[in-house]
Amino acid sequence: MAAGIVKLCKTLNSNAGQLRMCSCTKLRPSSSFIQTQPEILTRRLQKDGIRNIILNNPKKRNALSLPMLQSLRDDILHEVESEDLRVIIISAEGPVFSSGHDLKELTSAQGEQYHKMVFDTCSEVMTLIQDVPVPVIAKVNGLATAAGCQLVASCDIAVATDKSKFATPGVNIGLFCSTPAVALGRSVPRKVALEMLFTGEPISAQDALLHGLLTKVVPEDKLEEETMKIAFKICQTSRSVVALGKSTFYRQMAQGRNAAYHIATQVMVDNLALKDGQEGINAFIQKRKPQWIHTTESAQE
C-alpha cells in the first residue's frame, strides 16, 4: 500500500512543476537584504516508536497552505513502513491548532490549476492519515477550523483540551466547507455536521466529544500525559496486527452490514494465520507476555 502512496505523491509532485515549493520550507526576505532562508513549517520528532509531527507556523495560525500540506504529507510518509514506527501524533504550536486553508492561496489571482492542486493535496493528506498502517492521533490544544477541523476528524484518535473549539465557518466567507464535510460527516451525526456547516458556529470540546469528533477531553496540563498514555499502549501491541485491523476497519465501514461481515470474517481468519496472531493466543494460554515480531509472515512459514 505504501508503495502506491509514494508513487501517487511523486506523480502529484511532478504535476506541480514550478508551483511546488520545498515541502518543509518557504522563502522569506531578510531584514538586511533579500535572500532565501528556510522556515520550518512542520517539525518531525521520533522516539520509542512514537512520531510527533508538529504544525509549526503559529504566526499564520498554522494555516494549511500548500507548502504546509506538502510538508505534513512528507512527514507522515517518511519511512512509514519501518517497524520502528508504531504511532503518529499530530499537534501544533501556538493557540490555534489550525485555521484551515490559507485564504491568500484561494484568490482568483492564483488560478484554477493552483486551487485544484491545493485541494487535491489536502484530500491526499486526509486519506493518507487513514491509509497508513499505524494509528494517527490528533493532539489538540486550541481552535481547529475548516480544514483544521477536517484534519482532526480524519485522525484515528483525537485528544483535546477542554478549551479547544471546532468549527467549519467557510459558509460565512462564501466558501462552503465541502471537503471538510467529508471527514466531519463521517465523524459526527449528520444533523450536527450540517448545523456546523450551515452556520459556521464553533462547538466546544465537550460537545465535540459528545458527538464523536473527539476521543477524549482533558485539562490542558494533562494533554501530553493522556495522549502519550494512548500512544504507549499502542506500542505494546503487534504492529502487523494493528495495521491489518486498521485497514479492515475503514474497509468494512464503507460497506453494508452483510458485506462488512464478509470482509471482517475473512480478515479474522487471515489474522489467525499471522505469526503474531498465533503468538498472542499461545502467550495467553501459557500465561506469559507475548513476544511480538511485527511481521506479516504466516505462522505456517
Image (cartoon, helix red, strand yellow):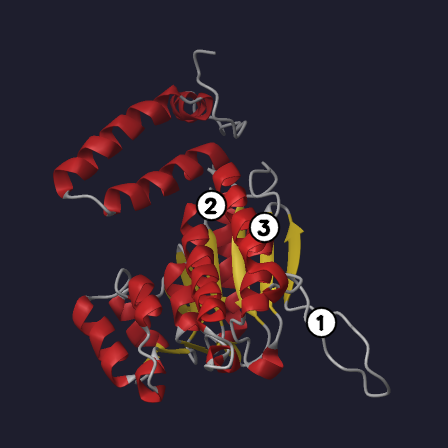
Left or right: where does residue 105 sit relative to residue 266? right
Tell me where residue 153 appears, x and y as whole percent. 37, 63
Identify the amino acid type marked 2: Val
Say above or below: 174 vs 263: below
Callout in the foreground (2, 1):
1
Identify the amino acid type marked 3: Ile
Query: Looking at the image, is mark 1 or mark 3 earlier in the sequence?
Result: 1
Tell me where residue 207 appears, x and y as whole percent. 29, 75
Q: Residue at x 44, y 16 (%)?
A: 299
Asked which secondary structure carries label 1, the reply is loop
Callout in the foreground (1, 3):
1
Tell me where residue 149 appears, x and y as whole percent. 39, 71
Tell whether label 1 touches label 2 (CB within 8 Å). Answer: no
Tell me where residue 172 appears, x and y as whole percent. 32, 88
Identify the amino acid type marked 1: Glu
Q: Which mark is residue 39?
A: 1
Query: Looking at the image, is mark 2 or mark 1 earlier in the sequence?
Result: 1
Q: Is residue 144 visible?
A: yes
Q: Which mark is residue 132?
A: 2
Callout in the foreground (3, 2):
2
Residue 36, quarter of the rendered image: bottom right
Query: Looking at the image, is mark 3 or mark 2 earlier in the sequence?
Result: 3
Quote the CA–CA distance across marks 1 and 3.
24 Å
Quote the CA–CA distance across marks 3 and 2.
14 Å
88 or 234: nearer the viewer: 88
Asked which secondary structure carries label 3, the reply is strand
Quote the CA–CA distance across marks 2 and 1.
27 Å
**Residue that badge 3 annotates:** 50
Say above or below: 127 vs 21: above
